[in-house]
């Protein structure tokens, strides 16, 4: 006997309680026979106006993550998809790997997270020189840049949008994202990356690929793509960029 709807896979999904984007984004990317089961990492919607307050936000997420995993385990998920990204880039590639290992040990199943999913996507495209933007503050962009550099990529440029609270990340407009893409793009960039799972870019990234003629990787697309491929689900999904259509 198998799960009536999740007869291929039951994905557990983690996301901060303030995140209103990753759950619908992942549902839009979901193929038939795979189900998403969301567990909220309980955090307050505190204002974020500087590096110190952003570090407090990351600490709040880290303190509550394992409890959210415990909640998910009771549905007997077959795989865990992490719908939160900042913490997955922390302390370089080695530190991020140690964090991922802890998550896998806790969950008891395989795990896809934003940092390593984007690395896999960039390697799929054979990209070497990248630019990225985030809704974060400088202290977090420093961690993202370090991770990518540890992976062997050259980070040409990056921008942080400094969104003023966790909930307000989801209020980031397409125009803000288009402006950021234009600022970091150039002939010296092989691929553009957007990080921050509460910022919806899965459709805009696909559109940007058409007019830029290069990969534009939205972290939610990359993370869900990575989870599907790790579970040998190779369905293609039109409208969400090259990753979901051709890889």
Image (spheres, rainbow, N blue to C red):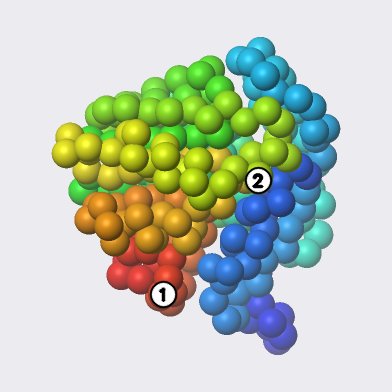
* Residue located farthest toward the left when viewing the structure as drawn: 187
Above or below, 177 against 21 in this view is: above
- In the rendering, at what x and y percent does residue 221 appear? 48, 57
Q: Residue at x 76, y 53 (%)?
A: 39
Q: Is residue 139 visible?
A: yes
Q: Which residue position is annotated with label 1?
A: 238
Residues 227 and 220: in front is 220
- Circles 2 and 1: CB distance less than 8 Å? no
Q: Residue at x 39, y 50 (%)?
A: 217
Q: Residue at x 72, y 85 (%)?
A: 4
Q: Residue at x 67, y 66 (%)?
A: 36
The residues bearing labels 2 and 1 have C-alpha atoms spaced at a distance of 24 Å
Quadrant where the C terminus is found in the figure: bottom left
Above or below, 14 against 5 in this view is: above
Q: Earlier in the sequence, mark 2 or mark 1?
A: 2
Give the label on residue 170, or none: 2
Q: Quadrant of residue 159?
A: top left
- In the rendering, at what x and y percent does residue 178 appear? 42, 45
Q: Quadrant of residue 179?
A: top left
- In the rendering, at what x and y percent does residue 105 appear? 63, 43
Residues 185 and 230: in front is 185
């Amino acid at each position: 006997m198998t799960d009536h709807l999740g007869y291929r896979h039951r994905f557990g999904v983690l996301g901060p309680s303030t995140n209103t984007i990753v759950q619908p984004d992942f549902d839009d990317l979901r193929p038939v026979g795979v189900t998403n089961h969301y567990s909220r990492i309980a955090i307050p919607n505190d204002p974020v106006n500087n590096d110190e307050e952003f570090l407090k936000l990351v600490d709040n997420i880290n303190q509550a993550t394992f409890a959210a995993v415990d909640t998910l385990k009771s549905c007997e998920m077959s795989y865990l998809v992490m719908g939160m990204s900042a913490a997955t880039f922390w302390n370089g590639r080695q530190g991020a790997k140690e964090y991922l290992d802890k998550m896998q040990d806790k969950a008891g199943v395989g795990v896809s997270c934003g940092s390593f999913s984007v690395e896999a996507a960039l390697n799929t495209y054979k990209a070497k020189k990248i630019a990225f933007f985030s809704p974060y503050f400088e202290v977090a962009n420093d961690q993202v840049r370090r991770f990518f550099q540890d992976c062997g990529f050259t980070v040409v440029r990056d921008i942080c949008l400094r969104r003023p609270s966790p909930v307000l990340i989801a209020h980031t407009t397409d125009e803000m994202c288009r402006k950021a893409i234009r600022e970091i793009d150039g002939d010296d960039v092989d691929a553009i990356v957007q990080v921050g799972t509460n910022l919806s870019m899965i459709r805009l990234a696909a559109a940007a690929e058409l007019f830029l003629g290069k990969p534009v990787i939205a972290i939610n697309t990359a993370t869900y793509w990575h989870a599907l491929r790790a579970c040998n689900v190779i369905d293609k999904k039109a409208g969400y960029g090259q990753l979901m259509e051709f890889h």
